[in-house]
Amino acid sequence: MKIVIIDSFALIHRVYHALPNFTTSSGEPSGAVYGFCSTFLKVLQKFNPDHVCAAFDDGSKPTFRKELAPLYHANRPEKDASMIAQIEVIKDFLRAMNIPIYIAPGFEGDDVIGTLAYRFSSQENAEIIILTGDYDTLQLVNKTTCVFTMRKGITDTILFDENAVHEKYGFD
């Protein structure tokens, strides 16, 4: 069973900054929506998964890490208002496509992804593909889980399986 888990915020952040000048005909920013949807459709075509789900950060309250260490992510800039608005459009798109959205209060999307990958890996013939815009989830790569991400822009992509991680970083 082939499952794609979308690291939604990492992907949105990546495509938002890769396509900063995309707008609708009325001038509304749309780079994140366009980039997310086009990448999502490319992944569906490339991998033909049996199931897809999306993980998001919970922005309603501080994460447990922030509560333990108040300086955690202290230097991160605030999210742009136009990116936040596009996140809601992307969630609407996922709901329209009947893609389950997973959010865990007090946890980051990466925590949710790790939990989902672990649980799905027990399925017979599990093949898990994490679609992301960064390299944070490479630590989850194993015999059943790989990471599909971008090297540059949104079209230069790479699939990290165990061999690719070893080749690039020299460890298993």
Image (tube, rainbow, N blue to C red):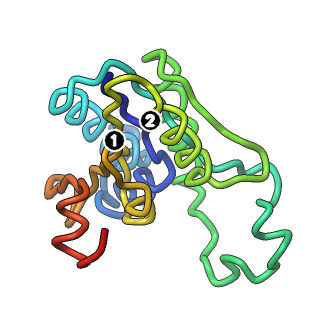
Observer-nearest of 2 and 32: 2
* Image side of residue 116 versus residue 163, left or right: right
| Towards the viewer: 153 or 49 | 49
Instruction: Give whichever of 127, 108 is nearer the camera.
Output: 127
| Residue at image coords 40%, 52% | 11
Task: Locate residue 70, reporting x and y percent.
Answer: 82, 79
The quadrant in which residue 101 appears is top right
141 above or below 119? below
Q: Looking at the rendering, in which quadrant would you find the N terminus?
A: top left
Residue found at x 25% / y 57%? 162
The residue type indicated by label 2 comes to Ser
Q: Are marks 2 and 1 in contact (CB under 8 Å)?
A: yes
Residue at 28%, 55% (x, y): give it. 149
Residue 85 horizontal side relative to residue 46, left or right = right
User: How far apart are the two marked residues, 2 and 1, measured between alpha carbons?
Assistant: 6 Å
How far across and down, in percent of the image, does residue 5 sit? 43, 37
- Total marks shown come to 2
Q: Amino acid at mark 1?
A: Thr
Q: Residues within 10 Å of mark 2 (few under 14, many from 20)?
A: some
**Of 164 and 23, the residue lying toward us:** 164
Where residue 7 sits: x, y (%)?
Answer: 46, 47
> Considering only vertical position in the picture, is 79 above or below 56?
below
Q: Secondary structure at mark 1?
A: loop
Asked which secondary structure carries label 2, the reply is loop
- Residue that label 2 marks: 121
Other residues around mark 1 within 10 Å, as few (<14) / some (14–19) / many (≥20): many
The first of marks 2 and 1 along the sequence is 2
Q: Which residue is mark 1?
A: 144
